[in-house]
Image (cartoon, rainbow, N blue to C red):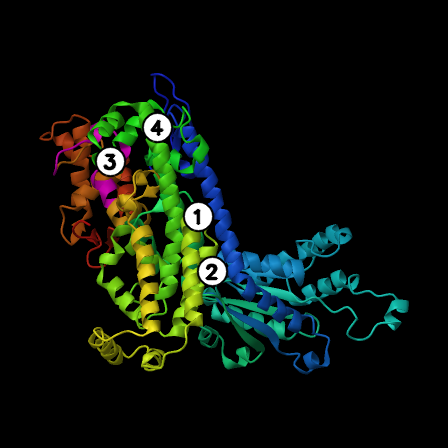
Amino acid sequence: MTSSVSKGCFVFKSASKKRKRHIGVGGYLVDDSDDNGSDRFRICQKLWETVQMNTEVIQDQLNKKILDSLAEFIKKHGLGCSSDVWRQRASEIPTAALMLGVNVPDHAMTFRSLCNLLQDSVTPFVVSVHAKECAAVKLLIQKVLEQLMGSGVSVDEEKEDDTALLQKTPCTISALCQWYKTVTKKCTQVSPERKENLTNNDLPQSLPVVVIFKYFEAFNSQVLQDFILICSRYTQELPFVFIFGIATSPSAIQHRLPHSVSSLLCIEVFHSLSCTQHLASVFDKLILNSQFPLKLSSRVIQVLVGIFLYHDFSVQNFVKGLQFSMLEHFNSQPLSVLCCQKQEALLSAKTLSKQNVERIRHLPSFMRYVETQEPQEQVRLLTNDEHVKEVCQKLLKNLHKYHKNYYPVLQCLHSLTSSLPKFPLGKHIRELHVSCIEKNLWETEEYDSALQLLRILAKDELVAALRKCAEILKSANTKRMQNALQQLEDFIGRLETLEEDSSGNGVVSAKMEYQRTDLFQLQKTLLEKESRRTKRMNSFEVLRSQVIDFIDSLVREYLTPAEFQPLNEVCYYSSSGVLRQRLNVTPRTSIQAALSHPFYYLKNASLKTDAGTISSAAPDLCIVYKLHLECGRLINLYDWLEAYVTVMSAAEDQDTDSEECGQYDSLKHARFIQAVSEMEFLGFVKSTKQKTDHVARLTWGGC
């Protein structure tokens, strides 16, 4: 057996029939003897790579604007260092304060993209420093010189000379100046004949030296002050440009730098998109996508979004949760291979084997489907495997069509209701999506409230909202969505040709436009509409009512809960409990479970014990932990040692009443001291000044 319980993957060869297994994504063991295990592994691995690639593309697209702005800022200030304006402000260093937000795990990708962009389009002299590597000014300067002088960023012919220069040159800014002049001399050389024909603006300009401070708040204040003061003395020779990666607010610069130092910086603030906007983009393009085979249940989405909102606001960790859901789904659901099969090859002999057919018959959604059929059809579905394959092909096609119709209608409904007061159906589309897949949306009070607000929209607002819906439906390629688009465009045309009726519609429009958040006025308007219900409606009100009824019919037809669809278990992952246990872990609970019940992790039969007993075969740490649970606030080390020796004596089959039972040798003493040290490291006990031969207990009760 293995002696380590750390994270890893261990393979044990049994004496029985050999089974081919290999390590899959995330360290899972893939059993090739399974009828479709290799297919599930291949599909999961491909989807894993797709999610990772799409996430990077989405983040690059979202960061493109701010990264381009930073590049323009550096070009404007760094490349213009030879101008007269720069000479007048030579003591100031251009500084970009990049506000990235508190989602620190996402910053690494942003900094990586920024470095690549600057090196490709602005300057090859880009340095990225981290606080943990720069505890002193000397270390910070050394890090800057290593990344610049040791990387051979000048012409290729001088690469060996640059490396030798770094080894012989002391780590000072003056040495960096000499190196900078050497490597840029050839780049800025212009022949005398060409120089006569060039204007001042056409002359080659010095390339800026960009220093990126990752996680600005983590740097030591004194280190930053000294480094800025030193660099400000060399601005005539080195065109420095600083970029501060800030997670909190711009005031962090004033808090960490005194005025005498911050006055040496020419600071411009750049704001990145919020993490919630990043999440919305990832959610829309990955999860709300009919082409992505894995679907998440409402509870799983709530777990992932809850961890995002209440823990770290990290989109990267949200994507990791999505990848884990995908990994867990393909590992635990043998029928998950069906969700990625082409419609023409759904019934290959390997995909729908006899074992898979039986699994399909046991799916709750398929059992409900069978109950709705005629008695003769029920018998065929329960006895004829070939007939089940034919029916499954039809059901999988219907499930695919359901998703292709679901998402466009969902987006249309969100575009209509997202501008309503107080967002009755949620501000974000993910909230509306969760409501739709867990229950009948049209049976909720929020939906009725949204329809009432839509029924009092003005003509211009209604037409603008319907145009957005038409743009969404144009991207759908199903016949039903195209028919819905034609009807919607017909309504838009009729609304545009309709003459404005001044019999009160303008009053309602003004109220909705200028008092959109006045709840009292909104209630009054609704009551007035209710009182005029018996009154004859004008042509616009009739047409508006028809439009809302049409939208309501689309919702009732296409936004049915996913659990009502047969075979939804094939592509929907719903184990929210497992996901919460894996992602939202509680370390103390896991540690206490491991120390109290080591059999749960080690799977050793000798470790099984009854409640309240201590196994002498358990690891020393487990024995010491269980003994400390019987003590009070202060634990006498000698008594603790005596109890430990008594338990260990039982393992040696010694008589507990004999004199030798209480004696211990140096080996047992050393093992006990090591176990107590591990207890202190884990935070269960600590030394106390009250009594030198005692330790204080720090934890009470279970989790």
Whether residue 366 is visible: yes
Under circle 1, the secondary element is loop
| Disc number for residue 389 | 4
Q: Which residue is mark 1?
A: 478
Is residue 570 positioned above or below 525 on the image? above
Q: Is residue 234 left or right of residue 351?
A: right
- Pick the residue in front: 121 or 535: 535
The disc, 4 or 3, on the residue closer to the chain's N-terminal end is 4
The residue at which mark 2 appears reads as 471
Asked if one can make out residue 303 in the rendered structure from this viewpoint, the answer is no
Look at label 2 and name its amino acid. Glu
Which residue in the structure is indicated by mark 3? 600
Q: Amino acid at mark 4?
A: Lys
Front-most of residues 195 and 423: 423
Q: Amino acid at mark 1?
A: Thr
Of callouts 2 and 1, the N-terminal one? 2
